Amino acid sequence: MIDLTGRVALVTGASRGIGRAIALKLAKQGAIVVAAARAQNAAKTVEEITTAGGKAELASLDVSDAAAASAFVSGAFEKHGRIDILVNNAGITKDTLLLRMNRAEWDDVIATNLTAAFTLTQAVLKPMIRQRSGRVICISSVVGQAGNPGQANYAASKAGLIGFAKSIAREVASRNVTVNVVAPGLIETDMTRLIAENAKDQWQAEIPLKRMGTPDDIASAVCFLASDEAAYITGQVLAVNGGMYM
């Protein structure tokens, strides 16, 4: 059984969907979860964790604000004296064909999905290296592996996370810090609910397991990579996609 008792976990984009599920499952396994999202949007996640007897704190954070992201990490470290887990989950989409995509739509997605992971990871590595332990987990996407029309910005950001994680994994492995990626496939979230039903039906038909994934499927993979059971795994991409992309 996975035991994360007493470990401090920072989760971005924790207000809903995959981020919420990750925060809930980490807390269920005993972690102290710092749930971050814009404004006070993760308040319900924190309430759900504490009501169930877990430990969680609320953080208001725009991950694209580098100064705020650094302050978020510093605040968590000052309070708890350590940071054990960082889950870079926050992400946005601004889908359109490349010929119609404006620079702001490109920049906003890259800033939130990729550059924020740089800022937050750089900040947490300092305490992790000092304590000679840590887990960094980036949430990528099947789109970052296979591409998708109309999502050049999103695909680039998610593919970038894979190269980023593999590079950092090599840099910090000697300090017992692992860096891995979880790449979800088609998952039942608010984001995918906006997809036309006929498109979802077509995609599901092509998934070997013949269903969409759930946020809990992703959360289980994250908890595994955050645990001692994954101590000898680093620089890897764990695809959780029902066989959609192999």
Image (cartoon, helix red, strand yellow):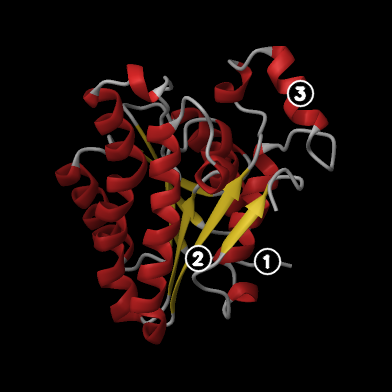
Q: Amino acid at mark 3?
A: Gln
Query: Which residue corresponds to mark 3?
Result: 202
Q: Mark 1 and mark 2 in contact? Answer it, CB < 8 Å.
A: no
How packed mark 3 is, by other alpha carbons closer than 10 Å (few <14, some 14-19, many 20 or more), is few
Task: Pinpoint residue 17: horizontal percent, then vertical percent.
Answer: 57, 32
Query: Which residue corresponds to mark 1?
Result: 2
Q: Residue at x 33, y 33 (%)?
A: 109
Q: Amino acid at mark 2?
A: Gly
Task: Pinpoint residue 158: horizontal percent, then vertical percent.
Answer: 44, 45
**Quadrant of residue 74 in the image?**
bottom left
Q: What is the C-alpha distance between the residues marked 1 and 2?
A: 13 Å
Q: Is residue 236 above or below residue 107?
A: below
Q: Amino acid at mark 1?
A: Ile
Do we see residue 35 in this rendering?
no
How packed mark 2 is, by other alpha carbons closer than 10 Å (few <14, some 14-19, many 20 or more), is some
Q: Secondary structure at mark 1?
A: loop
- Residue 182 placement, left or right of 73: right
Query: Which residue corresponds to mark 2?
Result: 6
Q: Secondary structure at mark 2?
A: loop
Task: Pinpoint residue 79: horizontal percent, then vertical percent.
Answer: 28, 58
Q: Secondary structure at mark 3?
A: helix
